[in-house]
Amino acid sequence: MAANDIVFGTDGFRGMIGDKFDFNNVRRIAQGLADYMAYKSMKGPDKKVAVGYDRRFLSEKFAEQFAAVLQKSGITAELSLTPISTPAISVLTEKKYVMGVVITASHNPYLYNGVKIKYKGRSAPPSMTAEIETHIPKNPVFEVKEKVEKKDFRKEYCAYIKSKYDIKKILSGLKGKIVIDFMNGAAAEVAGEIFGKDKNIISLHSERDPLFSKIGAPEPVEKNLSHLLKAVKENKAVMGIAIDGDGDRFALIDDKGNYLTPCQIAPMIADYLVEYKKYSGKIVQAVSLGYLTKRIAQSKNFLFEEVPVGFKFIAEKMFSEDILFGAEESGGYAWKNNLPERDGIITALMFLEMCFAKKKKISEIWAEIEKKYGKSFFLRNDYHLPKPVGNKHSFAVKIKKKLAKKILNYKVKEANTLDGLKVVLENDWWFLIRPSGTEPLLRVYAESDSVSNTKKLLDIAYKASV
């Protein structure tokens, strides 16, 4: 197999288990990382790599082989004793470990697994993963038998979380049940330590189930949250929280049993940071997120920027600039005075603190945002194509050329090709047409002030792309 068959996408390398993702390719990536570290003089007794894994099929075995290859190559590797979330490994790489690796396919269905690389408290930057790819050998790397030290990484991660929030105080001040759907993911490994035995916490799908048999896939989107929605309504809960398979993405159900989209969650966080925390700085978000965060930035004369899809682009901005808040459409959020990394548990605690500080319910907090900055109805549709789009940029430019000057009676204010084609109307409504590039898949996103208008935008966007 050619070296370039291993490509790091929006966040790591992923493939179907037994096909593109197998022990040989895991070992090849490990060898590539080891050779990269040697080339960059990142090799030595004080330059250790933390290797973690999620709860998927064979994840611990893949992690063992990854760590063994590093160890054999002269890189000191330490392996997690238990499944662990991706943000936990990021925490370790802030100071103690020079690099981190997580065997995970994040929110993908059970047939998939993958590799994420972490560096200095965040996802490895695109320039780093691109260079690591060049070091991945063409030829197979055979099974390695090497002793690797195992460590319980959970304690350091829990200490980090507790340094950010007074959890007992927040929970004691909230009246009512809180339902948390762990989606059979690695975040459940620290649930007891973080939330204790609080009687108001109701946990769903906290057990290990590599098939995700009750939820379909560990992706915190509305179609996978029927159990959570039901539990919130039955228990008349304060809120419902969902955290994805590797613990970095977050979803929210309000006290009335309504699913809130990321285009609603992001402005709620941003407004709280600005008005209650008194934070300032630039707001940065993925091009697939909505307009309310931009309106918040404009109201405070803060800088605002959109970046391509993939939290690594947001993380790089947060690492090098004065960023108040970063967000993406797939449920990842990070803010000032934390690591430049999304974290489902940290985001959950943010909303618990928000309700505690404001003495208001989630539905009331959202109503305030809607009144101040406008309504948001966001939808996304995925369409299968006959074959993958070869050149995303050319595809976007072709659509842009035939774009009407007015859509739904509003002038087109902007049409950018940062990542696909995003069309913004004069009233801020928008749609994004974004082909996968590696899969025969077209993603179409839209946001407006009503469900009917958003559906119209989705329809117009899809028809323009075929």
Image (spheres, rainbow, N blue to C red):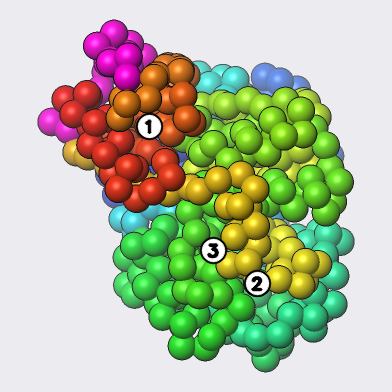
Q: Nearer the viewer, residue 453 or 183?
A: 453
As measured in the structure, the alpha-carbon distance from the residue carrying label 3 to the one carrying label 2 is 12 Å
Q: How many other residues sit within 10 Å of disc 2, few (<14), some (14-19) or many (≥20)?
A: many
Measured from the top left, where is residue 346 in percent x and y? 70, 59
Residue extent of the magenta highlight: 385-406
Question: Residue sitting at 68 percent across and 51 percent down?
Answer: 269
Is 14 magenta? The answer is no
Q: Which residue is mark 1?
A: 431
Mark with earlier residue (3, 2)? 3
Measured from the top left, where is residue 396 in percent x and y? 33, 17
Question: Residue sitting at 37 percent across and 32 percent down?
Answer: 431
Measured from the top left, where is residue 142 in percent x and y? 43, 40
As measured in the structure, the alpha-carbon distance from the residue carrying label 2 to the one carrying label 1 is 31 Å
Numbered badge on residue 361: 2
Question: Residue sitting at 83 percent across and 59 percent down?
Answer: 164
Mark with earlier residue (2, 1)? 2
Q: Could you tell me which quadrant the N terminus lies in?
A: top left
Mark 3 touches mark 2? (CB < 8 Å): no
- SS under mark 1: strand
439 w.r.t. 195: above or below: above
Question: Residue sitting at 75 percent across and 53 percent down?
Answer: 272
416 w.r.t. 111: above or below: above
As measured in the structure, the alpha-carbon distance from the residue carrying label 3 to the one carrying label 1 is 23 Å
Q: How many other residues sit within 10 Å of disc 1, few (<14), some (14-19) or many (≥20)?
A: many
Classify residue 92 as left or right of residue 385: right
- SS under mark 2: loop
Q: Which residue is mark 3?
A: 252
Amino acid type, label 2: Lys
Amino acid type, label 3: Leu
Numbered badge on residue 232: none
Classify residue 149 as left or right of residue 61: right
Residue extending furthest top?
Answer: 401
